Image (spheres, rainbow, N blue to C red):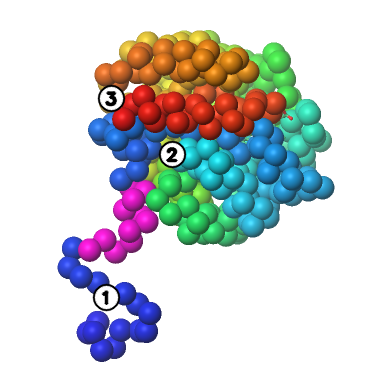
Amino acid sequence: MSGNDRPVGQPTQTPNAPADPAGDAVLDSAFLRACRREPVPHTPVWFMRQAGRSLPEYRKVREGVGMLDSCMRPDLVAEITLQPVRRHKVDAAIYFSDIVVPLKAIGVDVDIKPGVGPVVEKPVRSRADLERLRTLEPEDVAYVTEAIGILTRELGGTPLIGFAGAPFTLASYLVEGGPSKNHEHTKAMMYGEPELWADLVDRLADITAGFLKVQIEAGASAVQLFDSWVGALAPEDYRRRVLPGSAKVFEAVAPYGVPRIHFGVGTGELLSLMGEAGADVVGADWRVPVDEAARRVGPGKAIQGNLDPAVLFAPREAVEQQAGRILRAADGLEGHIFNLGHGVLPDTDPQALTDLVSYVHEHTS
Ligand code: CP3
């Protein structure tokens, strides 16, 4: 295009100038650099559940709006996702949603009950139940594409993390019919009907991969696969009965080249297998120090974590002592992203999170 026929308002492109300055800033952000195990200006920090009940501004915009309804309103999703970025100056935003949103989108009768969590009216226990789980099409979650469109414009140089629940954790809610301590029905299917279980995991892998693809195509710069409850399994069962599904998800999104993070709670004995499933970054909870987590995961992968979220209820000096311990353990690691070992607890003082972000930034730059 010559200078004369350039539409009014279009900037002149000089040779070698960035075509998309915000996109370049995202790619060069501390968060994405750490995911790629490149040198960073400071250790990047974000918090699982940073958008949520700990923030008064979140509680205000959610007044009178059900949890799943809020996930389907692009304006609200964008606002809630941005709130912790504005307040805490975290290095990444995480898309506000829930792991059961793609299930709801394909017609599963799931609801989120306040103070309980996801509840499934008719649990998945048989092959006929499994057949009700159809493939997810991008049109099923058009609100996700719209919300991420708003977010990538508003976030500027801050990367957006997309996420989904991993097959095991989703299966646990579907098979139990709600939150579960012992996952007895899930394990009964896993051991008693291994073919049905394998097919369920495979079907959920397709749904999850479809949901992550929508988020990446809309502009998410990284994805996290939450296998929150997989720590309930022994390594050999994880390897045979769960890893193939999670690996299928990671493989499906590999061509996009965005970093893939994998996280679960109580997964000390599974860390190396969770890396093997195909993650670029492995998240650890607080039960395993980050240097030991890195040793278990092996070379070639970054580590995310891992302050115990309950530590944030202690005085500031104690929080800094514990955070300092993690930073010393992470010193020398190739790629460390500071996070909590699980989500922000609802009663956390938001100021403790803001202070923690500045502490990590100041002590690593
Ligand atoms: O502060 C908040 O908790 C925000 C609102 C909310 C979310 N999910 C957002 C969410 C609420 C009330 C839920 C319900 C829900 N869903 C619960 C909590 C039950 C309760 O009332 O305490 C749970 C356990 C689920 C199922 C779920 N959702 C799991 C297991 C995960 C994976 C992460 C984890 O915590 O282990 C999710 C993802 C989820 N739900 C996120 C958010 C904002 C993840 C993204 C993030 O980390 O920010």
Circle 3 sits on which residue?
334
In the rendered structure, which disc, 3 or 2, sits on the residue that comes first in sequence? 2
Residue 328 against residue 209 in the figure, above or below: above
Q: Residues within 10 Å of mark 2 (few under 14, many from 20)?
A: many
Q: CA distance from mark 3 to mark 2?
A: 18 Å
The mark closer to the camera, 3 or 1, is 1
Three-letter code for the amino acid on which mark 3 is drawn: Glu
Residue at the outermost bottom position: 4
Are circles 1 and 2 on residues that touch, CB within 8 Å?
A: no
Q: Which residue is mark 1?
A: 12
Whether label 2 lies within 8 Å of ligand 1 gets the answer no
Residues at marks 3 and 1, CA–CA distance in whole angstroms: 40 Å
Quarter of the figure with the C terminus: top left
Q: Is residue 68 left or right of residue 351?
A: right
Q: Which residues are magenta?
A: 17-27
Residue linked to disc 2: 91
Say whether marks 3 and 1 touch (CB < 8 Å).
Answer: no
- Check whether the beta carbons of the residues at disc 3 and disc 2 lie within 8 A of each other: no
**Residue type at the position of mark 1:** Thr
**Residue 288 or residue 3, whichever sits in front:** 3
Question: Residue 31 appears at what percent x and percent y?
Answer: 38, 37
Of the pair 270 and 332, the residue shown nearer to us: 332
Residue 359 at x, y percent in the picture? 44, 26
Q: CA distance from mark 1 to mark 2?
A: 31 Å
Ligand 1 sits in which quadrant?
top right
Is 152 left or right of 179, judged from the image as shown?
left
